[in-house]
Image (tube, rainbow, N blue to C red):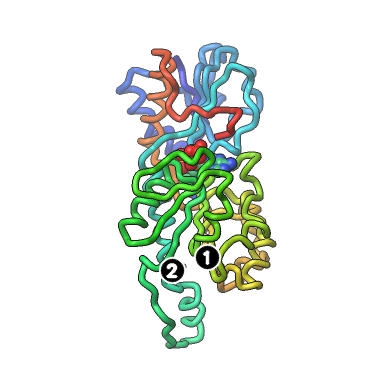
Amino acid sequence: MKLLLLSTPERARAWQPLFDAAGETLVVGEDAVTDPAEITHIACWMPPADPGRYPNLRAVISTGAGVDQMPALPPGVALTRTIAPGIDELVRDWVVMATLMLHRDMPRYLEQATQGDWRAHPIRAAASARVGIMGIGRIGRAAASTLSALGFDVAGWSRSGEPVDGIAIHGQSDLPAFLARSDLLICLLPLTGETRGILDDRLFVGLPENAALIHAGRGAQLDMNALGRALDSGRLRAAMLDVTDPEPLPQDHWAWRDPRVIITPHVAAQTDATEGARHALAVIEASRTGVPLPGFIDRARGY
Ligand code: NDP
Ligand code: OXD
């Protein structure tokens, strides 16, 4: 088996010793491929323009947690996403930070600070705030567990409605009830045909007055104009976004200058190189032994 890595030189330098230690072959960059028929795996954010050039390709490994950026692959080539505890922990931390910032009125205090305005507003305990997490998978569960430990009243929404210990779960058809109890709405959904544009006018209307949005899923899930309308109508009081539509958000976009919106440039997580290499090695090992590939993407579901 040979893995072709399409990534930065820094990532390649971190992967090489781990592949050497595992006795696996790493090929860095398409220019280094001598015989395309030897390549069995490709690890990349975006695959090469012509994956069909590799007749024995078994799997493409997304170096991130998401796969929505991947074009269609040739039939018979599996798609996997990187499973790494570090990704879950980093996004959890960003989500917890954003939740606390919005719960404790930071957008308002940051704006007051620009005017030297020393004014206090009422403080509410975490237990009085209802958090709703859309997408209660690996990352959503990690966030739910920490936010619950901080005292927030946490519920989750998922496609299957599968139970999660200690968290009230709403299934897909139960979205209205879930939204109606979400003072702080967190989006951690994968981008699929079903979730594209899900954060729209209709959804925001279902939230309690003065709710807040925390978005770390994918930019294309959020209608930015609907966000503006929800802020202006008072349905939302604030939002914290790690992902936007488009990315990068143009310099002259209204959201950069709106004090109710805090934006970070898609930095909730970056895949740790060592964890990425370990995941790729686990995929190769699974291919060799014929067990299910870690992070395998069900194409019909899209995640
Ligand atoms: P998982 O696959 O573990 O979890 C996905 C969750 O979303 C599951 O609960 C799933 O429900 C639910 N879901 C999927 N589709 C729907 C739908 N149509 N309706 C309702 N629920 C749905 O993913 P992760 O937690 O690992 O990651 C989630 C996303 O976070 C990634 O896809 C990526 O977009 C984003 N991300 C963002 C990062 C950043 O830096 N901002 C970094 C890493 C990830 P069920 O379990 O029932 O199938
Ligand atoms: C990812 C991301 O998918 O960084 O890993 O968004």
Residue at disc 2, secondary structure: helix
**Label 2 crowding class (10 Å Cα cut-off): few <14, some 14-19, many 20+?**
many
The answer to which of 224 and 266 lies nearer the viewer is: 224
- Asked whether 76 or 236 is in front, the reply is 236
**Relative height, residue 100 to residue 43 (above, below):** below
Residue 26 coordinates in the image, percent (x, y): 43, 23
In the image, residue 11 above or below residue 37: below
Q: Residue 83: where, in percent of width, then height?
A: 42, 35
Q: Which mark is residue 267?
A: none
Residue 103's mark?
A: 2
Callout 1: helix, strand or loop?
strand
Query: Neighbour class for label 1 at 10 Å: few (<14), some, many (≥20)?
Result: many
Q: Nearer the viewer, residue 176 or 265?
A: 176
Question: Is 120 drawn above or below residue 234 in the view shown?
Answer: below
- Three-letter code, disc 2: His
Which of the 4 image quadrants contains residue 85?
Answer: top left
The C terminus is located in which quarter?
top right
The kind of residue on which mark 1 rests is Ala
Q: Name the residue rendered at 58%, 54% in the picture.
A: 176
Residue positioned 46% across, 30% down in the render: 295
Q: Quadrant of residue 146?
A: bottom left
Mark 2 touches mark 1? (CB < 8 Å) = yes
Query: Which quarter of the image is occupied by the N terminus?
Result: top left
Residue 216 coordinates in the image, percent (x, y): 51, 52
Write down the residue under mark 1: 212
| Residue at position x 60%, y 69% in the image | 235
| C-alpha gap between disc 2 and disc 1 | 8 Å
Q: Is residue 94 visible?
A: no
